[in-house]
Amino acid sequence: MSTVLYIPGDSAALALGADEVAHALKVEALARKLDLTIIRNGSRGLFWLEPMLEVVTPAGRIAYGPVTPGDVPGLLADNFLHGDKNHPLYLGKPEEIPYLKNQERLTFARCGIIDPTDIEDYIAHDGYRGLKNATGMQGADIVDAVTESGLRGRGGASFPTGIKWKTVLGCESDQKYIVCNADEGDSGTFADRMIMEGDPFLLVDGMTIAGLAVGATKGFIYIRSEYPDAYRLMEQAIVSANRKGYLGPNVMGSGKAFDLELRLGAGAYICGEETSLLESLEGKRGMVRAKPPLPAIKGLFGKPTVINNVLSFVAVPTILDKGAAFYKDFGLGRSRGTMPLQLAGNIRHGGLVEKAFGITLRQVIEEFGGGTASGKPLRAVQVGGPLGAYFPDALLDTPLDYEAMAAAKGMLGHGGIVVFDDSVDLSLQARFAMEFCAIESCGKCTPCRIGSTRGVEVIDRIRNDENRQKNIELLADLCDTMLDGSLCALGGLTPFPVQSAIRHFPEDFNRPSAAKRAAAE
Amino acid sequence: MSGLAAANSPARSWDNDAALSIVQEKKSLDGALMPILHALNDKFGYVDASVVPVIAEELNLSRAEVHGVLTFYHDFRKEPAGRHVIKICRAEACQSMAGRDLEEHVKRHLRIGMGETTPDKHFTVEAVYCLGLCACSPAMSIDGKLHGRVTPQRFDALMAEKRS
Ligand SMILES: Cc1cc2nc3c(=O)[nH]c(=O)nc-3n(C[C@H](O)[C@H](O)[C@H](O)COP(=O)(O)O)c2cc1C
Ligand code: SF4
């Protein structure tokens, strides 16, 4: 009988050599005349253990990792196919690894477990139960369930998803659209990518439910071009879903139609901003539109449009399957449900941590992350992407929920957590925030387009100890101008990382200039 | 279509007829301009300026509109890249793992700056802002293949493979 092995096809696993391991397995299996079936799953999100190989044994799946191609002959010679406990790479049952065991995986329940190319595997793991329920409901009832669940947008702005859907439902129009924002531009984030690569049918499921809810028959997924593997897997999923009647003219026999198309971004961060994304989908430059009109009322091609982040759509099947109350039971205050956090940067155990809202930054970094990768003391943490604040150790007890983060002058954003050790120079990080804004600005507002370039120059002068005090004041003014005079959050929030760096790490803006340091040496 | 090999495919010589047929094949898509530009970029490794009036005519747009879109997006090349394209992530997660040092090393190794191509047209180095590999930084892609936790030594070894 064939032994079944899982080796991830997730991009991060690929970047760590998963394809080479799969190839070595095939070569060795041939040489040893072993009958192996190799499935390319998504990642479980324990990236320090990737490539993580799992073998199916009578006792369940047993994991080994991180595996290199050089480990493969030894693994196959040993008793690994039967779950050998004595192998140095033995990890045991993946679900028993504390990092996974201590999570609350609702959205990521299947990621890393199923074969992302096999719709039957998705269905066998409770897939399409949410959609099945939705086909028997009125659109307004679906919207109500989403509203009651407390789900707020996971893309950054945290707007209540149900309210957005309700607006679109209430619009009369010959055509409405569902658009998925899969532009995931924030450094430190990869949850959208993992879902698209590890559980793509879940996104199809969630978007189809949205279509039924608001009466839209067509959807687009806008995927950044940096994610070719996600694109390919989503493409396959859409083909399978069409073939099996989960997409197309008669979704699950409901008599209702829903079609999905994919579009690729082209390397512009600003196209993650929803109106810029819509412009890009229409085939234009990604210039931000003024709001109002809201996309919900005048969105893609001028039609009422639901636009949500990947993580917002993929929370919905659970809500429709298990009920709004079930989902709402996780979390606290106005942050309900679970949040897929992404632990990144200088962290020992980087990966995907899905937890109910309320866990603190310190708990995630210490209990899950295990401290810095370098072993040096942690000095700063940037939460929420390039527009998010830098937090010092003193703020690490902030709970990771929307309100608490905002109260600490930060934001949760898309849930990216980037850890820095004590080699970081926050004046350089502030400079990068301005530089990034200058590179990615759509160019519509002067404070964003010109102010950011001026910001880089001013920070350079501060770093060079030229008129330091005056330039620090100038930088503060510049930040205020950007905050007030920008149409969207790129220009409007770039001051956050800059000001937080100055506020919490003033010493980094008060060091001797490079020239003085060189002279002293 | 995918547009996925974009910027990674070796440059092929521009062919007006092939370009026109790509434009015609895609022009009925909703928001056809982006898929068209991706397909051209994919096929030829860049988008030749001579196609701008062709697209404008087929899509009923002004030349300025087509040109505006072509130049707005970082992905669309105006000229062919080197044989091998190295994209280095410059974003924060990679910075936290000595990404800046890696970037300097790469530029020194190839003796070119970001966005440049070596005189022998073998290598092009470009910045990318996040490859979604932030839990295994620093990251880069070489000819579309992803690499995580790249050290300068590992980069040198990868380059030796490309040169051999
Ligand atoms: C500069 C900028 C970049 C953004 N990038 C993204 C992104 O990559 N992905 C995303 O889902 N939302 C992004 N957003 C937020 C979107 O504008 C929008 O709020 C989101 O797509 C709404 O979906 P949600 O309610 O499900 O979060 C960005 C916003 C700004 C201002
Ligand atoms: S703030 Fe910047 S990116 Fe946003 S609309 Fe203005 S110029 Fe464009």
Image: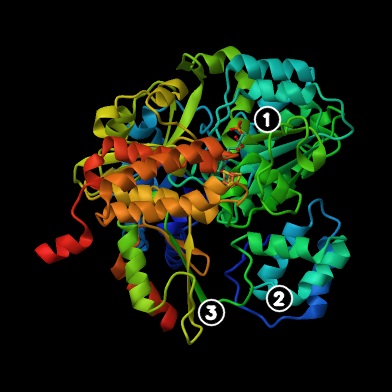
The answer to whether residue A455 shows anywhere in this view is: yes
Q: CA distance from mark 1 to mark 3?
A: 45 Å
In front of the other: A188 or A508: A508
In front of the other: A41 or A441: A441
Q: Is residue A399 left or right of residue A131?
A: left
- Can you give x and y, in whole percent of width and height, for residue A140 in the image? 76, 17
User: Residue B83, which numbered label?
Assistant: 3
Q: Residue furthest bottom?
A: B120
In front of the other: A454 or A177: A454
Chain containing the residue with disc 1: A
Residue A136 falls in image quadrant? top right
Q: Secondary structure at mark 3?
A: loop
- Can you give x and y, in whole percent of width and height, for residue B77 in the image? 62, 70
Q: Secondary structure at mark 1?
A: loop
In the rendered structure, which disc, 2 or 3, sits on the residue that comes first in sequence? Answer: 2
**Residue at the spot 36% in from the left edge and 47% down from the top edge:** A430
Chain containing the residue with disc 2: B
Q: Quadrant of the N terminus of chain B?
A: bottom right
Mark 3, residues whose alpha carbon is within 10 Å: few (<14), some, or many (≥20)? some
Residue A350 falls in image quadrant? top left
**Residue at the spot 34% in from the left edge and 77% down from the top edge:** B109
Q: Is residue A79 above or below residue A191?
A: below
* Colouring scheme, one of rainbow, by chain, secondary structure, one colour: rainbow
Q: CA distance from mark 2 to mark 1?
A: 45 Å
